Image (cartoon, coloured by chain):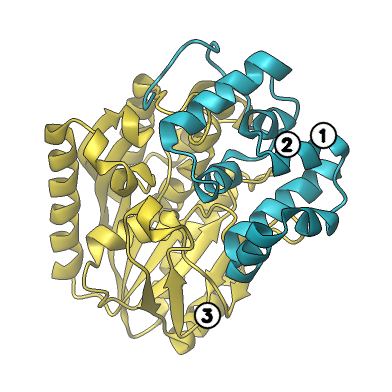
Chain colours: A cyan, B yellow
Amino acid sequence: MSLYQLSKLLYELNRDDALKARFREAPESVADGYALTGEERTALLQPDIGLLYVLGVNGQILMHYAAFCGIEWSDYLQRMRDGVKAHGPVRAGIYAMTTSVDEKIAGA
Amino acid sequence: MSLVFSGVCSHAPGITGRADRAPVEQKEALYAAFDDMRARLHATRPDAIIVIAAEHFANFFMNNMPAYAMGMADGYDGPIEDPAWLAIPKRRAKGDPDLSQRLIAEVQQTVDVAFAEEWRFDHGIMVPLHFLDPHNELTVIPANINCQGPPLTPLHRAWAFGEALRRAADAVPERIALVGTGGISHWPATPDSGRINEAWDRDFLDRWSRGDKAAMLDYTDAQTYAEAGQGGFEIRTFIAAAAAARGRGTVHYFEPIPIFAVGCTVATMEIA
């Protein structure tokens, strides 16, 4: 259920401007409101987009979190590749990578 | 009065958000196809447009995920995304709760559709509206098929939803247009973004254009995932649009545009 909690935090963050403001101010306190594992919490707060991807966060949520963090599109794609290199294949969800880590498809 | 228009189009956020990164001739051809679709749509003088989208966690999450949902609000704000990221300014689209209620009541005769008096548009609806309703004039009835969080509704049920929408559109006095947005093969928001299975897309569009129900429903989610990516689950919106139209389809534009992360499609189907 923990990936669910992580995903829910990102879903709510994407929808709620007040939560965005709170997150900018005190991200740890927002994270405290969700039952995250240590690994998830670290990935969220860094932010480690590659690890969030490997943990199985749905791409449709993750790409908005990356945009919120000011991460440009090509950089976003590269960070996911780097995440797979560092942490291994995607562990859960439906957004598994299907190309090799050095194979750039488009936009990077 | 009746369903007066049915079509399908792509809704990838890159179409607007990364417009300047596509080859200019490809972008212009796609945009021209959207312009043409807008002209065809408005020529039917619709009183309202049902947009069947595959929304992306803008409104619904896995604490209570409806397989099918329709909006019943007097207005809908969007985009939920950062307007600069999507390159679409915020707007409030017009709704019609009374019309929604009548449509939903008829749909419910055969499909258990959730209804929502609050609904915010993401790129799945905003990108099509950006092209099809640039002056924010249309009355919009949003509809959604869950294509994001498995377990996903079976394809034959997506067909049944389209049939129900047709019956509902034919039962109200208003002129109703319908646009399905989503699909076809793509791996959005992943390192594979830009991967497109063109042969799979063309085969699906052939089945769609023939209005061949059996062929359109002859996919498993496992096959779709393997051959067309998680974005391929969105063919449900195309299938519903075909079920509503009952006719033959014409693909006005199809071109893989990797930086937009999808084989971009603009197509209409005759109302039979």
Q: Amino acid at mark 1?
A: Glu
Q: Position of residue B52 (x, y in %)?
A: 44, 59
Which quadrant of the structure image shows residue A84?
top right
User: Looking at the rendered structure, which numbered label has been put on residue B72?
Assistant: 3
B59 left or right of B171?
right
Q: Residue at x 71, y 42 (%)?
A: A44
**Crowding at mark 2 (Cα within 10 Å: few <14, some 14-19, many 20+):** some
> Label 2 sits on what residue type?
Ala
Amino acid type, label 3: Met
Dot 2 corresponds to which residue?
Answer: A43
Q: Are marks 1 and 2 in contact (CB under 8 Å)?
A: yes
Q: Could you give the CA–CA distance between mark 1 and mark 2, rounded to whole angstroms?
A: 6 Å
Both marks 1 and 3 on one chain: no
User: Is B146 placed left or right of B36 in the picture?
Assistant: right
What percent of the width, then of the height, locates residue B106? Answer: 53, 77
Cα distance in 3D space between marks 1 and 3: 41 Å
Q: Is residue B250 above or below residue B232?
A: below
The C terminus of chain B sits in image quarter: bottom left
Q: Chain of mark 3?
A: B
* C-alpha distance separating marks 2 and 3: 38 Å
- Mark 3: which secondary structure? loop
Classify residue B127 by image quadrant.
bottom left
Residue B185 in view (yes/no):
no
**Circles 2 and 3 in contact, beta carbons < 8 Å:** no
Q: Nearer the viewer, residue B213 or B132?
A: B132
- Secondary element under disc 2, as helix, strand or loop, is helix
Residue hosting label 1: A39
> Is residue B63 left or right of B50 when viewed as pictured?
right
Location of residue A29 (image quadrant) = bottom right
Are marks 2 and 3 in one subunit? no
In this view, the residue in front, A23 or B166, is: A23
> Nearest the camera: A16 or B42?
A16
